[in-house]
Amino acid sequence: MTTFAPTAPSPRRESWLARSEAWLDSKGKGAWIAAMVLGFIFFWPVGLALLAYMIWSKRMFNGSCAAKARWSSHGMRAMTPTGNRAFDAYKEETLRRLEREQTEFEAFLERLREAKDKAEFDQFMDDRARKTGEMDDNGDDQAPRRA
């Protein structure tokens, strides 16, 4: 009995949809918009499907597809060691310091928000107590009598 091991899909076996998506991504957002407009011109359901896909996959609102690919590859390259130990140690220490400062700043903002909320609540309670005190003095808080 012979068993066949699964093989990796060859570029020829890749679906035409996947190849089209990769080609449009390499050309950028303008290619996606042009394909959508042509889809509406020739057969409106195709244009509508492309519009829905662009919105669903966030291609419509997130800059150029090619720019996103360049940005992600640049970001990954920035995190790899450079080979210069002194620079890598400096970069690591600086990143740690920036993360610590960010955490401290976020904690400061949280304390600031809590202090503001407490001040607003205390003011509300003081105003409420003052109004209640005025009502007690005037006798306005008593229920009206029926005749």
Image (cartoon, helix red, strand yellow):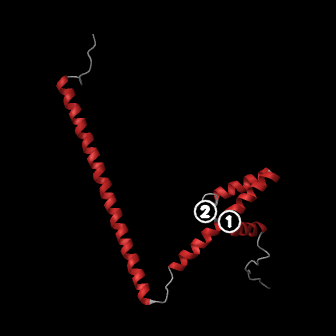
The image's mark for residue 28 is 1
Residue 46 in view in this figure: no
Residue 129 in view in this figure: yes
Amino acid type of disc 1?
Gly
Q: Based on the displayed image, in which of its 4 quarters is residue 137 positioned?
A: top left
Query: Which residue is label 2 attached to?
Result: 63
Q: Nearer the viewer, residue 40 or 14?
A: 40
Amino acid type of disc 2?
Gly
Q: Nearer the viewer, residue 11 or 104?
A: 104
Q: Position of residue 26 (x, y in %)?
A: 69, 70
Residue at the spot x=38%, y=76% of the render? 96
Q: Secondary structure at mark 2?
A: loop
Q: Position of residue 92 (x, y in %)?
A: 41, 81
120 up-or-down from 42: above or below? above
88 up-or-down from 44: above or below? below
Q: Quadrant of the C terminus?
A: top left
